[in-house]
Amino acid sequence: MLGLFGGYGMNSGRTIFAQLLDHLPIHEFRKCVARYRGNHRTKTFSCWDQFLALIFAQLTYRESLRDIVACLRSQSHRLYHMGFRGSISRSTLADANEVRHWRIYADFAQVLIDQARVLYVNDDLGLDLNSTVYALDSTTIDLCISLFPWATYKTDQHAVKLHTLLDLRGNIPTFIHITPAQLHDVHFLDNIIPEPGAFYVMDRGYLDFARLRRWTLAGAFFVTRARKNFRFRRILSHEVDKTAGVQCDQTILLKWFYSVQGYPERLRRVCFIDPQTGKRLVFLTNNFTLPARTIADLYRSRWQVELFFKWIKQHLRIKAFYGTSPNALKTQVWTAVCAYVLVAIVRKRLSLELSLYTILQILSVSLFEKTPISQAFSRHTRQIVETADHNQLKLFEI
């Protein structure tokens, strides 16, 4: 167990990258490879070598295949001890990204996601709520028109859309779907199996009453925003505490014919004034038991998925792609997700108080170091604190 969790004895002389691999269930990876025959007729560069190269690229911010290969070859004497068994070249890595099924890495990402969710299951959401809370959203990834002719979006823009279902305990992406950018967000709901008792928080782009009725029938709850032209019939009004920002809490029925056909049951309408911006927000939900303010706080928590998209675009390599085919693009996105979840797993297993961003920054400059991984994080943390204190002293010693 010391080797897995960064013990000093067993990890002395091993690179930090090799110690990170201790947290990967390699037997599960082999199952994913066998499922899609990823190593069929492969002699020198296995799926594991490809995966390690791409994870390394994500953690060290490599911008191109040439960049990846040059960096790894500069440390050729350490590659074997970092887990690499095949020779690495630009052509072999490019070919692997083109022909090896992206589902190998999607399936393995799901294995890591399941492990991470177990680790974060007891995290406090700050909502006085024991249920699982998911946030739904999507982000558009712009692509070069000449390099990605298949990703048609607009006349002057090519792109794909990344749809994500985020578990807010640990901000773990539990389901990801990559589609053409022109596909409307609401179609993403068709891919989700509602979890009884869970809450799903989404914006107005997912407001389709016929689809949302599946959540009610499955015993799951949703919180979304009403459109401006929303028409309804008030059945009952409940007392509210306006000092908490809640303006009204109503039980309603839909009025429009097609809306009623899609959702004939009652809904709850909560009107809330954001104290920071003064903006009036109207929420719709099928939950009638939580306090109205908690409904508003649930919707506010949806912004965690926006932060996830911002983080993954800034700190993982999905802006500059290593290949131009759909398979290469999806392979890179899923290995980026693997890197994100792996860091989340390590953070929890080592009981690190650092943010994911800080951990990634440390890893980006220390993967080749031969020191116990927990010691590396504690040392870098001290350096960060000491640097901050030193600058502050200079500021006030004028």
Image: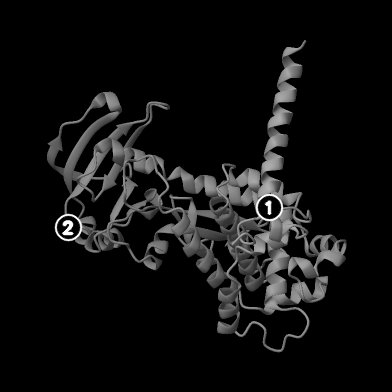
Q: Which residue is mark 2?
A: 264
Which sits in the foreground, 101 or 21? Answer: 21
Residue count near mark 2 (Cα–Cα under 10 Å), binned few <14, some 14–19, many ≥20: some
Q: Is residue 95 visible?
A: yes
Q: Residue furthest bottom?
A: 41
Q: Residue furthest left?
A: 235
| Three-letter code, disc 1 | Ile
Image location of residue 55, percent across then percent down: 68, 62
Instruction: Tell me what residue is drawn at x 62 percent, y 51 percent.
Output: 313
Image location of residue 362, percent across then percent down: 70, 46
Q: How many marks?
A: 2
Q: Which mark is residue 219?
A: none
Closer to the chain start, of discs 1 and 2, is: 2
| Quadrant of image for the N terminus | bottom right
Image location of residue 171, percent across then percent down: 48, 51
Instruction: Tell me what residue is drawn at x 15 percent, y 35 percent.
Output: 238
User: How far, Cα to Cα, is label 1 from label 2?
Assistant: 56 Å
Closer to viewer: mark 1 or mark 2 = 1
Which sits in the foreground, 219 or 280? Answer: 219
| Three-letter code, disc 2 | Pro
Q: Is residue 146 above or below residue 274?
A: below
| SS for callout 1 | helix
Taking the image as shown, residue 19 lies to the left or right of residue 69, namely left
Which sits in the foreground, 49 or 154? Answer: 49
Image location of residue 14, percent across then percent down: 75, 60
Taking the image as shown, residue 251 lies to the left or right of residue 157, namely left
**Quadrant housing residue 354:** top right
| SS for callout 2 | loop
Q: Which residue is mark 1?
A: 373
Instruction: Tell me what residue is drawn at x 45 percent, y 53 percent.
Output: 120
